[in-house]
Image (cartoon, rainbow, N blue to C red):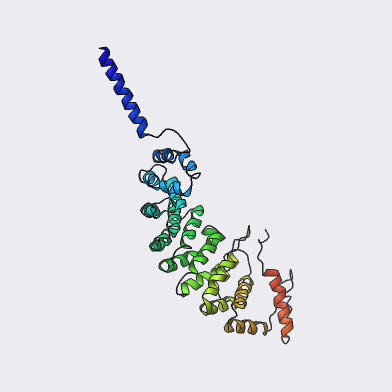
Amino acid sequence: MRLSRWISSFGLLSVMALSDGCAPAKDWTSPEYIANQIKEGDERAFAELTRLTPEQQKALVPALIEAYNTGKKPQRAIEALASIGDPSAKEAFSAALTQSDDMLAGLAARGLGNIADKGSAAAIAKRLGEVTTDEAYPAFFEALSKLPIDAAADALSGILMRPASKIGGAGSVRLGCKALAGASAPTDVILDALVFGLVNFVPAPFKDPMPDCELAILKMKDAGIPKLVELFEGKNAKVNDHLKAISYPAVTGQLRAAAVLAHSQNPAAIKAITQFVSTPHPCRRPNSPPWLLQTSRTSTPTAVRCSTRQQRRSAQPVAPRT
């Protein structure tokens, strides 16, 4: 009887010891313990992961993939995988990109960008077109700015024709222009998006993507000049409508086009600017009624002064008065 009880007790202790061997002892400095807790969906494990060395983090990629596949903290798992940037997570990223959760899909897009998966740009741009969560936009644009853009250029250009306030802000426009700068051929669709980016700022608080969009256009060399001249002459209806919608005058777009044309040092650009300043233009004093105009019909210097005065008033957009 006593022997039977002793055997039973010994068996129980053996099972407990075996169990202890399978589950690492609690130690938040141990990568093995953190990996086990990640697979269990322990929130603290994802925080502790960030304290590990890059080599230790990389060793936990299988545990993170398992956590995503089993549905235990999938967003935290994809976020960590994107930060680590290991190519072995590509399949998990591709699966998460198709999910309806915009934030999860955005993290997956960031992961694909971080591992430089060249074939994913089109899928990222397609999913970007379906985003409705403002906070999710930047991750998609960030990913596209890191990848060859040709396969996604048209889709991205279409999205960049939306007001910045509807695609996550001026930062999204900035990253979008940066991405399009990598296009191998400057199509009309791409150029339209870049030109629109010159005025796609956020009025209040003021955020401006113009520098990145200007650099992208200048990278296109002569191809962008006709579109810039059109904007400079005030003939870009899309830009004019957008500026009106945010309570800015059309001259804002013209002055920005003039700046880019001047920086291009292209003969056609210089010619357009020269023709403009050589032509008499009416302007009115600030706060004066529309019928009170100052006009020079013969004096080019007066026309230049008039244009300069208006430039000082409008070159740097500010929030409209309420």
Viewer-closest of 281 and 200: 200
Total numbered badges shown on the rendered structure: 0
Q: Residue furthest bottom?
A: 298
Q: Position of residue 268 (x, y in %)?
A: 57, 83
Q: Is residue 45 visible?
A: yes
User: Hey, which quadrant is residue 36 in on the image?
Assistant: top left
Task: Place residue 212 in its image quadrant.
Answer: bottom right
The percent coordinates of residue 116 (x first, y second) are 43, 60
User: Percent position (x, y) of residue 130?
Assistant: 43, 58
When the figure is inspected, residue 64 is found, relative to residue 24, above or below; the finding is below
Residue sitting at x 51%, y 53%: 135
> x%, y% of residue 318?
66, 63
The residue most toward the top is 1
Residue at 31 percent across and 19 percent down: it is 9
Task: Tell me which residue sits at (35%, 28%) in the image.
Answer: 17
Residue at 54% x, 61% y is: 164
- Identify the image quadrant of the C terminus: bottom right
